[in-house]
Amino acid sequence: MKMNRTITASLALVTLTLASLITSDANAVDEGWTVSFAEAKAQAAKEGKSILMEFTGSDWCPPCKALHAKVLSKDVFKAEAPKNFILLKLDNPRDKSHQTVEEQAQYRKLSAQYKVTGVPTIILADDQGRPYHQQVGYSGDPADKYVADLVQKSTILAKRNEFLAKADQAEGAERAKLLDQAIGLIDNELAISTYADTVKEIIKLDADGSAGLKAKYESALQVGEIKTALAEIQGGLRNGTPDEAITKIDKLIADKKPTGEGLQEILYLKSLVKFRSGDKETAQKLLEEAKAAAPKSKRAANIDEVLKNVFGAGK
């Protein structure tokens, strides 16, 4: 009986030791990270650093797991990244039992604000949370190269700040041009969604359109609004019918009267709906119209691939 108690006690000790080691390993990856956006901004302002936001799905996303294993958990990242960035982890795991309600709400808010559509997404932002670089996915780069590339991106922030400083000394169209140069360093869709006040000021400063900026940014704002509306229509396809989606798409065209990339996005989704409903002939025609609406856009290149690989066009 005494021997059994000794064995039981030893097994319990081993179990506790293993649990401690497992917990230690799990927490090691998160060492030096915060999960609070407010804390990250305050710390960044205090230390004169940028914020590195990692949007991730830690327990289900293979590229996220690879990024952690090959970069974020490595000594070079732990040693070098905190010299330049305040690290903010924004996780959207399947198992949310270890998260607070506030963390979950924060993820929903920030992923919408920064237009995060896939993980992992890394965003570099200033101490106010205004982004200056975004990268989606994990290319497989080793940790030392990955960290060096992120640090090099800080030059974008320096250039942005230089243009903003010059804009502070300018007026009218000249100020509009400098503001345009500042946010032009950033991904267009991200800039439109996170520099809304700057975009509105550029449009106001170029009210007569003489600098060509009013039309540029009004079009970009419309594209953003259209993409948001299309996302809602696409989400409704799960419970609705293709005909209902087409009706909503046609109403969007009538209401917005879009041209260029805005029209292209609408026609692209309309083609997808028609294809899924079995009307391949109409789907192809809509794709061709979509490409013609903005032939030099990023979406146009994607349309070319679909026309070639799905419809055999352009061979």
Image (tube, helix red, strand yellow):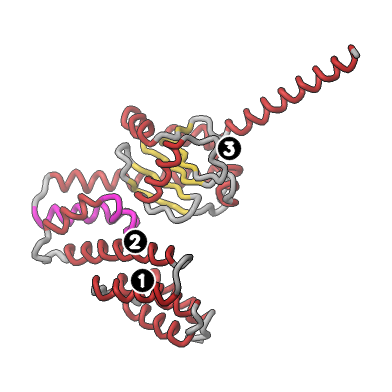
- The residue type indicated by label 3 comes to Lys
Q: Residue at x 74, y 25 (%)?
A: 15
- Structural distance between the alpha carbons of marks 2 and 1: 11 Å
Nearer to us of marks 2 and 3 is 2
Residue 153 seen in the current view: no
Position in image of residue 273 (x %, y %): 45, 75
Return the disc, 1 or 3, that comes first in the chain's sequence. 3
Return the disc, 2 or 1, that comes first in the chain's sequence. 2
Check disc 3 and report the residue beneath it: 74
In the rendered structure, find residue 21 and report the number of the disc placed on it: none
Q: Which residues are magenta?
A: 172-195
Q: Is residue 282 left or right of residue 184?
A: right
- The residue type indicated by label 2 comes to Thr
Position in image of residue 199 (x %, y %): 21, 55
- Structural distance between the alpha carbons of marks 1 and 3: 41 Å
Q: Is residue 186 magenta?
A: yes
SS for dot 2? helix
Q: Residue at x 47, y 34 (%)?
A: 100
Check disc 2 and report the residue beneath it: 228
Q: Residues within 10 Å of mark 1 (few under 14, many from 20)?
A: many
Q: Residue at x 43, y 32 (%)?
A: 83
Q: Mainly helix, strand or loop, the magenta region?
A: helix
- The residue type indicated by label 1 comes to Glu
Check disc 1 and report the residue beneath it: 265
